[in-house]
Image: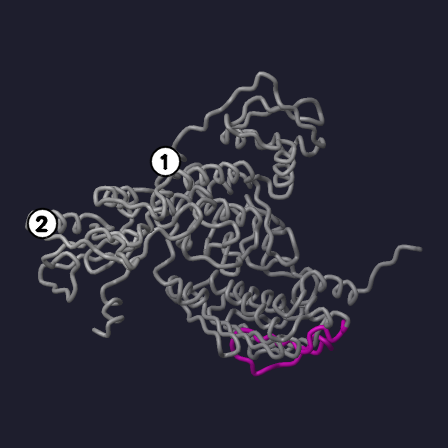
Amino acid sequence: MPIRVLPDFLVNQIAAGEVVERPASVVKELVENALDAGADQIVVDVVDGGRTLISVIDNGSGMSQEDLLKSITRHATSKLPSDDLLNINFMGFRGEALPSIASVSEMVIDTFNGCENNGWSLDCDTGILRPSDWDCGTRIRVNNLFAKTPARLKFLRGDKAEMMSVLDVIKRLAMARPDVGFTLNNKWRFPKNQDMNERIIAVMGEDVRDRMLEVNTKSSSTSSLALQGFVSEPTLRRASSVDQYLFVNGRPVKDKVLIGALRAAYMDVMHAREFPLCALYLTLDPRSVDVNVSPAKTEVHFLEPSHIRSFIIKSLRDTLAQTISDKAQFFPIKSPTKTEKTSINFSANNFHVCAPKRGPDSAFMFDILPENKKQKEETLAIEEEKPLGHVIGQVGNKYILAQSGENLIIVDQHAAHERITYERLRNHTIKVQPLLTPIVVSLKQEDVNAVLSITDEMRNAGLVIDAFGDDAVAIFEKPSDWDLNWQDTLHAIADEVRAYGHSSQLNERLHLKLANYACHHSVRAGQKLDFAQMDALLRDIENTNRAGECNHGRPVYKIIPLIEIDGWFERV
């Protein structure tokens, strides 16, 4: 069969198959164009999930008559001033979106650039250009999406599902640009110049209020590399990655390096089947990242992925490692001033609540002991200095009760001691065992190369390897108490390296081993503690990294404000 040059309409439809996957893809491309045009107010309307109509109106710079005609020409763009594809500073740049969308729909563009005598309206289906009374920015109406390629319609989901995908696109772009106002179907509104904390709440939900930790770090080795944003407390998580918003140089992305780094940072504070929330903004030299990877522009390639991954993991772990004493403002603990009066004060009475005991009927009983003046003064002094306050008792031999200011604090004694033990284990050097006879593992040549590319990372985990011919590696040193199936382990490591450029296998195995040891060598639920032991546990957890949750992601303590307790008893 002879080689055939395809006609333009077919070329555009093929390109549309890459760029225009669904209505949400159209919204993404059009809104990104609006942002690149300098718009700070964008209104999107979608009918029937985007099948019938997608309308995007912006107050950006608009287009001249000449530029309007060029805009639907394939590979025509205003966003690539030079021919340098490694220096891209716009959301869109490929010049494929408008001609691709026009090839599978009935699209009309109205625009005004403020310089000509009137606006212009272009029917992209017929090519007819007319003067228009449109007087600000640009409006693009996409009618009957996939009308020209009806076979594509059967691959769309229901209207509600497509609408949720459109909303997700708007949310991600709204998170990328809090300085811009977005409105979707006159229902979802994100005001212009919205405070970043409020925008996060508007996008993720009210339950994130006061539970996001700020990240603000810069690389010590590369001046242009920085990470800013917010991540959730480990006890705030989702069942999916729906509330993970990642950006590279202002561009929303779904990148394997970033997702892997986020997962690794939370590895010892959250269960593997749970997902943290985040809004993270990575900035770096545009020449260090290739955004021209896919037509949808959601994937990127880093020049030094391992360096980026390490930088993100360290930044997030440093944020999560804040102790209660270091970062007491994370926790709403407030001590009353001398002029304040409290309706209930657990230590101001003439009695001291001691550890509970079981009565004959298995109900809880408390030993009530008189409290002398000296004990009371010492207790109050502790209260003023310590974030978790002073011990007032133990319930069920599981939970320590404490008071700090106007807050009742309940501490899970096992979870607290488990975190303390785990962090102490982490600070110990891994014991490495040199092997008299190396362990030789046969691998495919490409797997050998993959494993050898991260030898420094493996050495940090206590595993020393080297090549053993072209199709095998030899293990010369290993962690002293590790007896793993090394064939399976190295295969898994190679698979990860080839897919993502890195591997978390060894760190995850190390975490699991330390977590299991910490769990089995910590104070148990059901173990009775005296006051000295309970106080020592509170003081230790106050100065322990990641103190808010145990190694499995369970909360270590809960803080109940007095005003909430008053509400239980209708005292408000």
Q: Between marks 2 and 1, how big is the CA–CA gap?
A: 33 Å
Q: Which label's residue is closer to the chain start, 2 or 1?
A: 2
Q: Is residue 242 left or right of residue 396?
A: right
Three-letter amino acid code at the position of disc 2: Glu
The magenta region covers 123-150
**Which residue lies at the image location 65% right of the left edge and 77% below the top edge?**
108
- Residue 109 seen anywhere in this rendered image of the structure: no
* Residue positioned most to the front: 360
Q: Residue furthest left?
A: 373
The residue to which callout 1 is attached is: 424
In percent of width and height, residue 52 lies at 66, 79
Task: Count neighbours of disc 1 (C-alpha within 10 A) and say few if under 14, some if 14 to 19, many if 20 or more.
Answer: some
Q: Is residue 38 above or below residue 133?
A: above
Q: Quadrant of the N terminus?
A: bottom right
Can you give x and y, in whole percent of width and height, for residue 306 in the image? 54, 39
Quickly name the residue at label 2. 377
Q: Residue at x 34, y 60 (%)?
A: 210
Instruction: Kindly tell me whether residue 465 is visible in this rendering.
Output: yes
Which quadrant, please, contains the C terminus?
bottom left
Left or right for 331, reference 251: left
**Residue 392: percent from left, percent from top:** 20, 53
